[in-house]
Image (cartoon, rainbow, N blue to C red):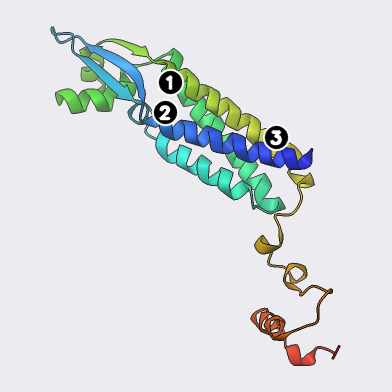
Amino acid sequence: MIRRARLLCVVMTLLAGATGIISSTQTWLTVTLADGADHVLLVPGASAIPVLAPLSLAVLALGAALSIAGRFLRYAFGALSVAIAVILGTLTWQVAFDPQASHAASTVTEATGISGAAAVSALVGSIGASPWTVVTLGAWILLLAAGLLTLATAHRWTGSGRKYRTDAAAAAPSASRPHDAIDDWDDLSRGEDPTTRPLD
């Protein structure tokens, strides 16, 4: 059950991050300009929320690191996942259910050359959110659940395996075979003097 919890946390985190990255390139808002010609502009997620792409990349990195993290880092990554989920969830909620001209400001300015909050707001005739906003909001809810599950179960996760451990126990040679020259080199790399070892 604990192994499943760890795997579940990693998969949920990676899925949330991947969804955020994909969503950042998709249309989040459709803006109709009040310019007499009713021009329509499509606003991608990365423009509606500038921190969407970088924080989504951070979530992907968290998911990958969580799979090999020690106990202290598990808690740190869990707390960080919760914080990112709350931040991005709040921002995404605003775009999804209360889109404002400010969310499309960069796209409007790029298309028209008009800048300034008041000028952009006056130019925007209507604005509507796409289903991608709701899909991405679901991803942040998933990330929040992953972070909370990590905090609740991290103390019971098993170690990450010998190849990721740096303590003496992981580096020590197996008792089932004799000490050889390779083990002597390993001892030296840890700062130990192999000549002081008792003869077998």
Q: Distance between the residues labelled 1 and 2?
A: 7 Å
Sequence-first tag of 3 and 2: 2
Given contact means CB atoms under 8 Å apart, are the residues at marks 1 and 3 in contact? no
Amino acid type, residue under disc 2 in the picture:
Ser
Circle 3 SS class = helix
Residue 133 pos. (x, y %):
44, 20
Q: How far apart are marks 3 and 2 (CA)?
A: 24 Å
Amino acid type, residue under disc 1 in the picture:
Trp
Residue 147 pos. (x, y %):
64, 36
Q: Quadrant of the N terminus?
A: top right
Name the residue that disc number 2 marks.
23
Residue at horizontal 66 percent and vertical 63 percent from the top: 163
Q: In which quarter of the image is the C terminus?
A: bottom right
Q: Label 3: how many residues lie within 10 Å, few (<14), some (14-19) or many (20+)? A: some
Sequence-first tag of 1 and 3: 1
Residue at horizontal 70 percent and vertical 85 percent from the top: 184
Name the residue that disc number 1 marks.
132
Q: Which quarter of the picture shows residue 168?
A: bottom right
- Foreground tag (3 vs 2): 2
Q: Label 2: how many residues lie within 10 Å, few (<14), some (14-19) or many (20+)? A: many
